[in-house]
Amino acid sequence: MTRTETAPAAAVRRETAPRPTRSTDEHQAVKPAPNERVGGVLGLTGAAVMIAGAVCHNAFGADLFAVMLSTDRAEIESNLTDVAEHRTPLMVGLWLWVVGASLMCAGGTLLARRTMGAWSTIARWGFAAATGAVIVFFTAMMAIVEGVAPAHAAGEDVITLATAIGYGAVTADSIATALILGLGYAAAVYSARETWAPSWLVKLATTSIVVSIASLILYRSADFAFVVVIVGFVTVIATGITAVRHAD
């Protein structure tokens, strides 16, 4: 009799007992966390290398971007002559930009928390896509420095070729800039809102992504490109410093 009475009670206890469920934290669980210090240092180093490349690019007065952006034949010819005379510092600057952009992409990928969240995935996708755009952009610029400019100095008519390559290079540059300085680092910051990214950094990242999106519309405006670079690099540097400080 006792067994008959206790069996339903045991069944009730089994039904009413709380079942183990996956918590929201488990759905958003952080995988083995990337080293925020390494990611921050890589981003900061990449920004410093990019600045060094800009110094090499502008130190001798040869304006490679003027070749790619100008539509005036006389101005293109003049700038191509300057580029041919200063090929070495321009190539050094371009290789520094390749290294710097790669370091920033690597650092940003590490900073994107490896969660199940969408922002982490977007950040990693952005940096991966930016790497391809960077390769196209810098290869095209190197082609102008090492191929088109010397041909112009030798007396060949290469203005049409310079314009065509320059258009592709500027377009790829705008895409890479928006992906790295805008989408990539902004998404990395958004993914870290619950860990190391303060609210002011989130707002700065939002500003950077808005400006970068606008740059895709105004990509042939040299003045606006300067604004994009300034805002973007401030975001990268602020993000790197914040991540390193949090890691300490």
Image (cartoon, helix red, strand yellow):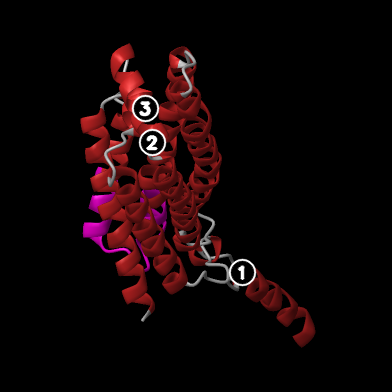
Question: Residues under labels 2 and 3: Cα distance?
Answer: 6 Å
Q: Specify the farthest residue to the bottom.
A: 2
At label 1, counting other C-alpha atoms closer than 10 Å, the crowd grade (few under 14, some 14-19, many 20 or more) is few
Q: Which residue is mark 3?
A: 81
Q: Which marked residue is nearer to the observer: mark 1 or mark 3?
A: 3
Q: Which mark is residue 85?
A: 2
In the rendered view, tell whether residue 152 sits above or below residue 209.
above
Name the amino acid type tagged 3: Thr
Question: Residues under labels 1 and 3: Cα distance?
Answer: 76 Å
To which quarter of the image does residue 45 belong? bottom left
Q: Nearer the viewer, residue 94 or 30?
A: 94
At label 3, counting other C-alpha atoms closer than 10 Å, the crowd grade (few under 14, some 14-19, many 20 or more) is some
**Residue 191 located within the stretch drawn in magenta:** yes
Q: First in sequence: mark 1 or mark 3?
A: 1
Q: Which residue does the image show at 43% across and 27% down from the upper left?
A: 171
Q: Which residues are magenta?
A: 186-207
Expressed as whole percent of the image width and height from the top left, the position of residue 195 reads 37, 68
**Residue 217 located within the stretch drawn in magenta:** no
Q: Quadrant of the N terminus?
A: bottom right
Asked which secondary structure carries label 1, the reply is loop
Expressed as whole percent of the image width and height from the top left, the position of residue 98 reads 48, 49
